[in-house]
Image (spheres, grey):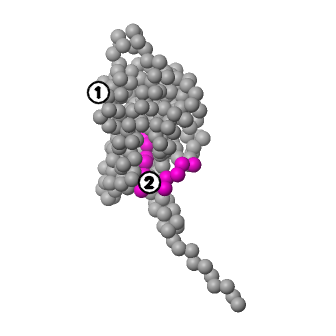
Amino acid sequence: MGVNRGWRRGILITFEGVEGSGKTTQLTRLAKRLREDGHRVVETREPGGTARAERIRDILLDAKAENARTEPMAPASEALLILAGRSQHVTQRIQPALRDGAVVLCDRFSDSTFAYQGYGRGLSITLLRRLNRFATHRVTPDLTLLFDLPVSLGLARRRRSERKQNRLDHETQRFHEKVRQGFLKLAARHSQQIKVINARADPETIAAEVDAIVRHFLAKRRKSKVTRRRPTIQKAHRR
């Protein structure tokens, strides 16, 4: 994406998708496998990831009906709260982990902002990208896994789960459809970074696909590093 990563020793892998896509479960599975392979792994999430950012998360996802009726959240307020939390998260947790050479697995990151607040809420993608660059100090994912499935299936999964429903779970299906299409447009535009995974499959099949994508990515990255470090041998000129 044209960002200088010279200061980074670690890797940032983000997990994206509509509600109920199963990305959080797959993040946990991948973290376990990477640790078994000897990697130092940091698991984190957005909104949230630090104590202050988690407090912002509570404001963003508050599902109390009376709050929604008396004071619905304005789209711009929602976006700015997310970016405020992200700035704190990147500065306090993600950047230090990347400098230390960790593999950072983040449940949602910048692409969620573009999909939810951009395509879903109708805010300017161009403006959101500018604000996001400011909030993240231009930190971008090395690899993004997008877990895609029909919105109706994802929302049904959320309703069946034991997790407490948040504010976004109560949005209309039309809103979530816009978000899904936004994610797919982002994936089409940035196909080198964003890999789309069929989230309708069973968890074991999905885990195997995630594992294959990440292993391929890590192998390619190692090969690239070796190539960059290999000294150039110049042939002697004939006399």
Secondary structure under the numbered disc 2 in the rendered image: loop
| Front position in the image: 102 or 187 | 102
Question: Upstream in the sequence, badge 1 or badge 2?
Answer: 2
The answer to whether residue 42 is above or below residue 175 is below
Q: Residue at x 52, y 51 (%)?
A: 4
Distance Cα–Cα, label 1 vs label 2: 38 Å
The answer to whether residue 38 is above or below residue 82 is below
Secondary structure under the numbered disc 1 in the rendered image: loop
Q: Where, quadrant-wise, is the C terminus in this rendering? A: bottom right
Q: Residue at x 49, y 59 (%)?
A: 220
Q: Position of residue 69 (x, y in %)?
A: 40, 10
Q: Residue at x 42, y 56 (%)?
A: 9
At label 1, counting other C-alpha atoms closer than 10 Å, the crowd grade (few under 14, some 14-19, many 20 or more) is few
Using the rendered view, name the quadrant where residue 84 is placed: top left
Using the rendered view, name the quadrant where residue 187 is placed: top right
At label 2, counting other C-alpha atoms closer than 10 Å, the crowd grade (few under 14, some 14-19, many 20 or more) is some
Q: Position of residue 227 (x, y in %)?
A: 52, 67
Residue 8 got which mark? Answer: 2
Q: Residue at x 42, y 37 (%)?
A: 87
Q: Position of residue 193 (x, y in %)?
A: 53, 47
Q: Nearer the viewer, mark 1 or mark 2?
A: 2
